Amino acid sequence: MCGIVAYIGTEKALPILIKGLRRLEYRGYDSAGVAILNKGSLERTRAVGRIDALASALAEKDMAGTMGIAHTRWATHGGVAEENAHPHVDCSGDIAIVHNGIIENYRELKQQLSAGHTFKSQTDTEVLAHLIEANYQGNLREAVQKALQNVRGTYGLVVMHKKEPDRIIAARLGSPLVVGVGEGEYYVASDASPMLAYTQQVIFLDDGELAEITRDDLKIVNLKDEKIIKQTEHIDWNEAEAEKQGFPHFMLKEIFDQPTVIKDAMRGRLIAPDGTAHLGGLSMTSEQMASVKRIILIACGTASYACLAGKYAFERLAGIPTEVAVASEFRYSDPIIDRQTLVFGVSQSGETADTIAALREAKRKGAYVRGIVNVVGSTIARETDGGTYIHAGPELAVASTKAYTNMVTVLLMYALQFGRSRRLTVATGERLVKALLEIPEKMQLVLKQSDVIKQLAEKYKAYSDFLYLGRGINFPVALEGSHKLKEISYIHSEAYPAGEMKHGVNALLSPEFPVVAILTSNALYDKMRSNIEEIRARRAPLIIVATEGDAAARELSDDVVSVPPTMELLEPLINTIPLQLFAYHVATILGRDVDRPRNLAKSVTVE
Ligand code: M6R
């Protein structure tokens, strides 16, 4: 939620900041702003709307300054208005700040400051600008340190002061910040993507750390000014991977990335001759693995649907009872956890506030806690005691696609690894490894049907409600398909296990309520088929995702999308793709902002 970029160096700051904001727009996009130290004055421009609106507002301005801060906002405190856009300034206009997070005691602080300070926005962030002003005695670092000692809540922030033209101060507590290390220049951002064009050398700030950054030096301390030594790390992602590469939207590019990036998730992790997988990041001895009696998969949104598919794999392959917990519920549920519980936090961004809090709770209660994340160096990656990167590459569309399939893949590999250390035979393991290795080619076969699916989208675009149905391993697929449709097309949709229909939902069926049913050749095929017959009898329009060559599915439905067969546990990797494409095409036909749907943000870093 909210994206921060800052630059200090010898180049003009403005183009770097604007380009960086475009990279971070997925984090929030209701307003944006920059502050640049330009010819001795601190110049601030803000605009409501996307980065384009800010760029237009700046078009005529002559900005040669080489130090600046910028922000793209997702409103939490205070409505969407220019006065609430960042950067915020103090009374003098000399101090400018950009902030991501929530200052929980901002009302108290505002009250305390009200005597000598004038507030111009409804935001919690502006209070920080005034608090720093109140503590400023000629040294910005000290003022920020003192101010932050009075703050309750979360922040990733960058501050600059007109009277200190050679430094910026960045600080983190609960909201990510990365420092990019160049030659005679530094970058700061909410993630590494804005700096990839200039450097792949980065330092991840941890909670409680504050960086004082000049053009030639970087000093990291805590709020008590104790020095902290940090390692510079190399990021493998490059700028080209974060481009659209000829696709009209990031989402479509990312859907089409899947056959490639799933290979990255599997590379070096499958051991075909032994019919197993080895994920070194698990960091557990065989005794510790054997002691695990229960697994909890914690996640939000799409990641939680990937976990539901993972649950089937852990239970079937390894015989370990597995639960999926939605992080926002888990964290306040006083969960029963012991040392024989293994908890995985699954997250594309690795920055989802609820997932982080849930994992901390699990850790406090003594569980083994591991991460399955995409963004390298993210909070979950660093706070867990081990885990695995899913290697999906940068995912910039708000709607998650390739991260989902790579999460399922990594969960399957973990289940295989646990299974083979327990009851699973080498023969079954070998079959699974072989089937996994065939997935990229099968994904390609589904992607080739994008135009056919587009025609279906054209046919069904005007309906206002959809129902997605699946059974067993395809119930999570239905949930994910429905989630994709609603988040990018704004069409209401629901997902149910097909066997539940008789218990209430059948009442909704009508010719106005299309049903998307997943009927692939697996153990529940006949059961699912009976459910579909019942829907047919109630004249709801039917789209079926069926295994290629299934003549019965054609007879039963109005429209069929064929998918290649695979092992049942792997079906989410294939069957989800037509649903991603369907949602994408419906949304584009309806003229929606597919990559940045309304009211959403890519990374939900506030509770
Ligand atoms: O970064 P995370 O995987 O932790 O994000 C979790 C959800 O916010 C995310 O999956 C969300 O549901 C997406 N918009 C789904 O497309």
Image: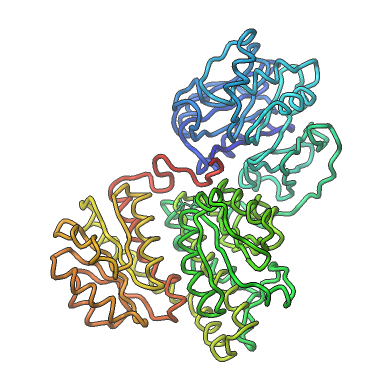
State the image quarter where residue 138 is shown: top right
**492 relative to 120 in the view: left or right:** left
Percent x, y of residue 493: 30, 54
- Total marks shown come to 0
The colour scheme applied to this rendered structure is rainbow
Q: Residue drawn 61% across and 47% down?
A: 193
577 or 359, nearer to the observer: 359
455 or 482, nearer to the observer: 482
6 or 331, nearer to the observer: 331
Percent x, y of residue 509: 18, 60
Q: Residue drawn 57% across and 38% down?
A: 3
58 or 176, nearer to the observer: 176
**425 relative to 56 in the view: left or right:** right
Percent x, y of residue 432: 53, 83
**430 vs 285: above or below:** below
**464 relative to 584 in the view: left or right:** left
**256 vs 487: above or below:** below
State the image quarter where residue 168 is shown: top right
Percent x, y of residue 59: 51, 25
Q: Residue drawn 72% across and 46% down?
A: 204
State the image quarter where residue 274 is shown: bottom right
Residue found at the far top of this picture: 115
**467 vs 198: above or below:** below
Q: Residue drawn 18% across and 78% down?
A: 555
